[in-house]
């Protein structure tokens, strides 16, 4: 029988102390703590030759798991094995680069990048410098980018030549960003060069910093900032039901919380090769990458988008022992199960996050992957997967599992904050007294305070406990749409729809979908002079996809004469949801 890091759940909850996690840190945590040091420098000293990151480019096929010695951080179709010594050197260079360009401790540095080594280098280097790291997923368009940059007065952004035009459009409304670092992969739209004016969009590009040149010139010796556990470290944005996305701030102590999850829920071991498919543009990416690196675990990353055949090839070629992904990916693998027939799997665990994992997918995983896919639950605010199924604990397919040791969670009455009895539906809630819990919404103390009732943080997710303390998800308490693991706020999508000249009014709701869980459906009232048609619907979809985000655009548009509203003029999304669900049955 396999040995796990957590063998007795109830005993672990009784014995658990956050001080034990802090004791693993190299500095006097949490009084003196820097994430970059804990996840990189101390391993570079102890095990410099161990692989930190094994990278496969989007066109990579058969590749070696030996260190390549390559210095380039980003080349589509290539592969690279970066050691902890490599990561330390390159993150030092990136920190030096930031210092040279007057990025100060506490300044916000964002990335708009694919899953490539340069992205991970920037993450660690920014934290070692004492600046605040924020990731923006490439699915966002210029509106989504500019809002995030402007909201927090960001100072710098790292992107690729392929993405430079999109970033240029975003920077028109983000004047505080003075430093633009561009990785030229070749064949892109240019990060500078002859196009010093940036064409018809964006600001002058003549000041762009060439990543390769700047990194080569930067010092590889850098003294990591002596930050404390209470210093700002990460800033990620999440969608809500009202208003624009909110910035969620995490401190350097955050890494202790995610380290606990990687140890007890993900159950990482010293010789694992861990593939988290999460992008660094979402907090799930740093949760898995930095939480695993805290323990010195080797990781794998793949630049390409999901493709069943490509993933099967990667699982066959690389000795990946732990896989962490989203239900949509597992569902699509199930639909294309034949690609796994000849695959020699090394998996000993598989995990899922983002939306409820159905019992059917769990059962399929046991047969096709040879492992039980463990469902996990968390939010950007919780900073971590706080309710999990564990390898040593009996899994109840369809259940979210039980709280991580060290975290108090339950189901409460959202009006009073009083815990409910087993079987009673309420809001999933937790005490915010653990290291990775968010420090607050960026410059919105009132919204932060409104998230609590009776000292319980309200998640906005409905659920219930069974008699044995397992959590069961029942849906959102608000109008946030869960689609393919993404949280999509209706306000942002409706605002983008409203910018199209044909749209007089719009409302979006989730529509059940077998593959994605839900898709975004838009009900649109047209402006005078427009008639609904399939071509117009496609034009409206494209508008939102290009201007806001590729994951948030409505995949279905229905034209209506009017939207149902309350007497005060508020859109009755409940009525639209009921109509949508009835039509889907």
Image: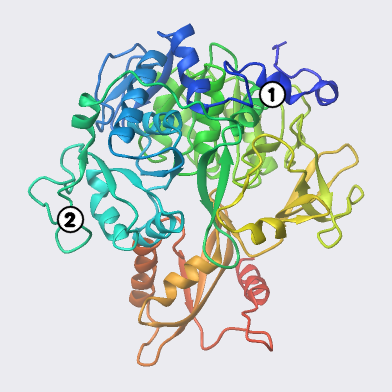
Q: Which of the pair 27/398 is nearer the observer? A: 27
> Residue, x 67% and y 77% (percent of image)?
575
Q: Is residue 414 left or right of residue 52?
A: right
Q: Which of the pair 320/259 is nearer the observer? A: 259
From where the camera sits, is residue 42 visible?
yes
> Residue, x 61% and y 61% (percent of image)?
480
> Residue, x 71% and y 57% (percent of image)?
449
Horizontal and vertical percent for residue 84?
Answer: 41, 15
Q: In this figure, which residue is indicated by the disc labeled 2?
A: 204
Q: Earlier in the sequence, mark 1 or mark 2?
A: 2
Horizontal and vertical percent for residue 98?
Answer: 33, 35
Q: In this figure, which residue is indicated by the disc labeled 1?
A: 264
Mark 1 crowdedness (10 Å alpha carbons): few <14, some 14-19, many ≥20: many
Q: Which of the pair 347/543 is nearer the observer? A: 543
Horizontal and vertical percent for residue 209?
Answer: 21, 40
- The picture quadrant where one finds residue 477 is bottom right
Horizontal and vertical percent for residue 495?
Answer: 46, 72
> Residue, x 85% and y 21% (percent of image)?
11
């Amino acid at each position: 029988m396999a040995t796990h890091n957590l063998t007795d759940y109830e005993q672990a909850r009784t014995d658990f102390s956050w001080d034990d996690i802090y004791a693993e840190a190299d500095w006097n945590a949490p009084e003196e703590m820097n994430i970059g040091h804990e996840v990189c420098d101390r391993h570079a000293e102890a095990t410099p030759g161990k692989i930190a990151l094994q990278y496969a480019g989007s066109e990579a096929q058969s590749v070696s798991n030996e260190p390549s010695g390559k210095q380039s951080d980003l080349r589509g179709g290539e592969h690279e094995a970066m050691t902890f010594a490599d990561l330390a050197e390159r993150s030092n260079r990136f920190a030096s680069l930031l210092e040279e360009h007057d990025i100060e401790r506490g300044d916000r540095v964002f990335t708009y990048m694919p899953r490539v080594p340069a992205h991970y280098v920037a993450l660690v280097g920014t934290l070692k410098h004492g600046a605040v790291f924020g990731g923006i997923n490439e699915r966002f368009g210029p509106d989504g980018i500019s809002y995030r940059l402007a909201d927090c007065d960001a100072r710098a952004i790292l992107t690729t030549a392929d993405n430079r035009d999109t970033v240029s459009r975003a920077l028109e409304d983000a004047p505080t960003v003075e430093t633009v670092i561009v990785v030229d992969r070749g064949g892109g739209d240019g990060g500078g060069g002859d196009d010093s004016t940036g064409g018809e969009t964006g600001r002058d590009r003549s000041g762009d910093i060439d990543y390769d040149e700047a990194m080569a010139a930067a010092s590889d010796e850098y003294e990591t900032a002596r930050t404390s556990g209470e210093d700002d470290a990460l800033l990620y944005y999440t969608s809500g039901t009202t208003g624009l996305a909110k910035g969620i701030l995490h401190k350097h102590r955050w890494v202790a919380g995610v380290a606990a999850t990687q140890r007890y829920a993900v159950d990482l071991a010293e010789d694992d090769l861990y593939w988290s498919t999460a992008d660094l543009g979402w907090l799930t990416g740093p949760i898995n990458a930095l939480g695993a690196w805290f323990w010195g675990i080797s990781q794998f990353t793949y630049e390409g988008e999901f493709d069943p055949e490509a993933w099967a090839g990667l699982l066959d070629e690389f000795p990946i022992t732990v896989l962490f992904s989203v239900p949509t990916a597992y569902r699509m693998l199930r639909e294309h199960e034949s690609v796994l027939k000849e695959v020699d799997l090394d998996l000993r665990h598989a995990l899922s996050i983002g939306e409820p994992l159905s019992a059917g997918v769990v059962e399929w995983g046991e047969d096709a992957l040879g492992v039980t896919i463990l469902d996990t639950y968390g939010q950007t605010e919780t900073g971590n997967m706080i309710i999990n199924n564990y390898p040593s604990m009996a899994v109840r397919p369809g259940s979210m599992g039980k709280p991580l040791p060290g975290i108090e969670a339950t189901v409460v009455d959202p009006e009073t904050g009083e815990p409910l009895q087993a079987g009673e539906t309420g809001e999933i809630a937790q005490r915010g007294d653990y290291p990775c819990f968010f420090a607050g919404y960026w410059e919105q103390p009132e919204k932060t305070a409104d998230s609590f009732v009776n000292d319980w943080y309200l998640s906005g997710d409905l659920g219930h406990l069974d008699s044995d303390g397992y959590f069961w998800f029942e849906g959102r308490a608000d109008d946030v749409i869960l689609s393919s693991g993404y949280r999509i706020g209706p306000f942002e999508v409706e605002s983008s729809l409203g910018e199209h000249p044909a749209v007089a009014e719009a409302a979006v709701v989730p529509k059940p979908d077998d593959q994605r869980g839900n898709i975004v459906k838009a009900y649109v009232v047209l402006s005078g002079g427009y008639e609904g048609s399939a071509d117009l619907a496609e034009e409206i979809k494209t508008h939102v996809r290009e201007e806001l985000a590729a994951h948030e655009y409505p995949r279905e548009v229905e034209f209506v004469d009017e939207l149902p509203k309350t007497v005060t003029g508020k859109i009755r999304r409940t009525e639209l949801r009921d109509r949508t669900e009835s039509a889907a049955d």
